[in-house]
Image (spheres, helix red, strand yellow):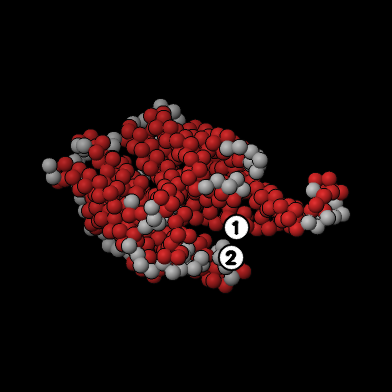
């Protein structure tokens, strides 16, 4: 049976909805995994590609920047090419560039291939969300968003673990080559069963796109490069910041004054969608910022290897999966705003427990807080995704889903940059303050470690290790406090959301 025969004018007539959902989610998980799976493989790439510690980060930067710039084009490309055609092209391009990354022979070739991978992968997540909303009737939107959200949120959680296992067991190239079988299955399923959608004639607002692309690209470069050049003490970061702010300001003026803007500002009049963008920004901060903190904390302070770290963090993904499967059915019967508030409270409680982490604890608090946080984020993500698109005009759906993904990714980038900056600086401050107590004039040191008080080098080195661990732990706890307050501050926004009508 051909794809044309399977196309349907309404969601109630879509055939093979289950197979379409499986194929779409395979492609989505493949793309989302690549945002984190390559991180742990960077040290192994450095020697093989002849790169330095400073330049190897461009393997991540090129992908992130390219994906961020192209994501807003999703709506226009979907109208001109057709959603089905765009999705198939994106999957084929992503698989081909994954193969190219797996056989890259130098750093420049890897950066180029990763850039192209970001270009092709940019449309996969927003178009997958659009298709799931299109092929499911409104009363099943919650279940559809639960399935979609599970892939979006679990992917980053298992990415570092899978990447670490592939790197240790085989080779860093398998971090990219693993996309080939997954992508082939997704491509086959989408080609056979994905329904066609009508194309629309839509002019391209080059000026608007250029302004938004410059703003997003400069912002991503600033966030990625900031930690390496000491942020605003560097002229490079000031250049990125001014360029991003000026371009975004011009973009806002442009879309409100031109006849055919790149993004129609009328979509922002929908209160649920606009509030949902703020919420997904906060979710992006919490999800990936906490994921960016935990693996290095477990390795640095607790000495966990990569595989053990993955096993300790796995319950977080299990909690998210359970929460999303349950809330996908609850969202039809319970006020989604109450579910969002409950999820934020659970997330805040998990972060509060994380503020009590100590270097001497076992892994039980990590497992427990991870499960609670997974449950909380699942409670937030599904109702939020459902409410945000419940009242928006269907003609804006492709643009809206691309913005939804873009804002989530920007929130993740900003959150990671902020917590990393605070962590680095607080470790230095804490080490200085704690190290001041290691003095021969401190009677407590004579009681705790007389050898260190007498100046024994081995004893002093051991004391320095203890101080380093304590300084780092305090810095991590400070970051957990920050994320907890950000989560609590988002709760009042739930009251701004408008409950969609039943069915």
Query: Dividing the image into 4 quarters, which one contains the N terminus?
Result: top left
**Secondary structure at numbered mark 1:** helix
Nearest the eye: 393 or 373: 373
Q: Looking at the picture, does residue 389 appear above or below residue 211? A: above
Determine whether the residue tagged by mark 2 lies in a helix, strand or loop: helix
The residue positioned 16% from the left and 41% from the top of the image is: 6
Distance from the alpha carbon under mark 2 to that under mark 1: 9 Å
- The residue wearing badge 1 is 421
Among the 4 quarters of the image, the one containing residue 144: top left
Name above or below for residue 2 compared with residue 460.
above
User: Which residue occupies the foreground of this view, 367 or 349?
Assistant: 367
Q: Which percent across, then down, holds residue 266?
A: 38, 52
Give the quadrant of residue 394. top left
Q: Mark 2 or mark 1: name the one nearer the start of the chain.
A: 2
**How many C-alpha atoms fall within 10 Å of the one at disc 1: few (<14), some, or many (≥20)?**
some
User: Do labels 2 and 1 touch, CB within 8 Å?
Assistant: yes
Residue sitting nearer the eye, 274 or 111: 111
Name the residue at 58% across, 37% down.
363
Residue of label 2? 231
Where does residue 36 sit, x and y in percent of width and height?
Answer: 44, 52
Identity of the residue drawn at 25% across and 49% down: 184
């Amino acid at each position: 049976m051909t794809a044309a025969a399977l196309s349907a004018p309404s969601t109630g007539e879509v055939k093979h909805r289950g197979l379409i959902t499986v194929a779409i989610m395979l492609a989505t998980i493949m793309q989302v995994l690549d945002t984190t799976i390559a991180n742990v493989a960077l040290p192994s790439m450095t020697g093989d590609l002849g790169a330095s510690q400073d330049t190897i980060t461009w393997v991540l930067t090129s992908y992130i920047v390219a994906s961020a710039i192209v994501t807003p084009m999703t709506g226009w490309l979907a109208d001109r090419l057709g959603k089905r055609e765009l999705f198939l092209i994106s999957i084929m391009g992503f698989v081909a560039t994954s193969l190219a990354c797996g056989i890259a022979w130098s750093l420049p070739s890897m950066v180029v291939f990763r850039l192209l991978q970001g270009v092709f992968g940019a449309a996969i997540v927003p178009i997958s969300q659009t298709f799931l909303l299109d092929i499911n009737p409104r009363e099943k939107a919650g279940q559809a968003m639960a399935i979609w959200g599970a892939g979006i949120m679990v992917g980053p959680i298992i990415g570092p673990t899978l990447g670490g296992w592939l790197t240790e067991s085989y080779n860093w190239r398998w971090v990219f080559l693993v996309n080939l079988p997954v992508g082939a299955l997704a491509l086959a399923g989408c080609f056979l069963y994905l329904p066609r959608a009508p194309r629309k004639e839509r002019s391209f607002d080059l000026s608007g796109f250029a302004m938004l692309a410059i703003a997003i690209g400069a912002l991503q470069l600033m966030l990625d490069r900031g930690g390496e050049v000491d942020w605003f003490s560097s002229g490079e970061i000031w250049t990125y910041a001014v360029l991003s702010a000026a371009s975004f300001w011009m973009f806002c003026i442009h879309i409100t004054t031109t006849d055919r803007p790149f993004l129609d500002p009328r979509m922002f009049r929908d209160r649920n969608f606009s509030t949902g963008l703020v919420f997904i920004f906060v979710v992006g901060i919490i999800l990936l910022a906490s994921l960016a903190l935990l693996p290095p904390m477990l390795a640095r302070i607790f000495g966990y290897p990569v595989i053990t770290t993955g096993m300790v963090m796995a319950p977080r993904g299990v909690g998210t999966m359970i929460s999303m499967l349950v809330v996908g059915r609850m969202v039809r019967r319970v006020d989604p705003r109450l579910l969002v508030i409950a999820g934020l409270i659970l997330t805040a409680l998990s972060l509060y427990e994380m503020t009590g982490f100590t270097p001497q604890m076992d892994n039980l608090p990590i497992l427990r807080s991870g499960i609670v946080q997974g449950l909380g984020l699942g409670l937030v993500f599904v109702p939020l995704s459902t409410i945000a698109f419940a009242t928006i005009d269907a003609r804006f759906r492709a643009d809206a889903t691309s913005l939804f993904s873009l804002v989530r990714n920007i929130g993740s980038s900003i959150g990671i940059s902020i917590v990393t900056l605070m962590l680095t600086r607080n470790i230095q401050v804490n080490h200085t303050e704690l190290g001041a107590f290691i003095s021969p004039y401190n009677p407590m040191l004579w009681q705790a470690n007389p050898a260190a008080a007498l100046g024994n080098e081995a004893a002093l080195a051991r004391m320095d290790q203890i101080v380093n661990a304590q300084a780092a732990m305090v810095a991590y706890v400070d970051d957990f406090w920050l994320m907890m307050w950000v989560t609590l501050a988002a709760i009042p926004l739930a009251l701004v959301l408008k409950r969609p009508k039943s069915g």
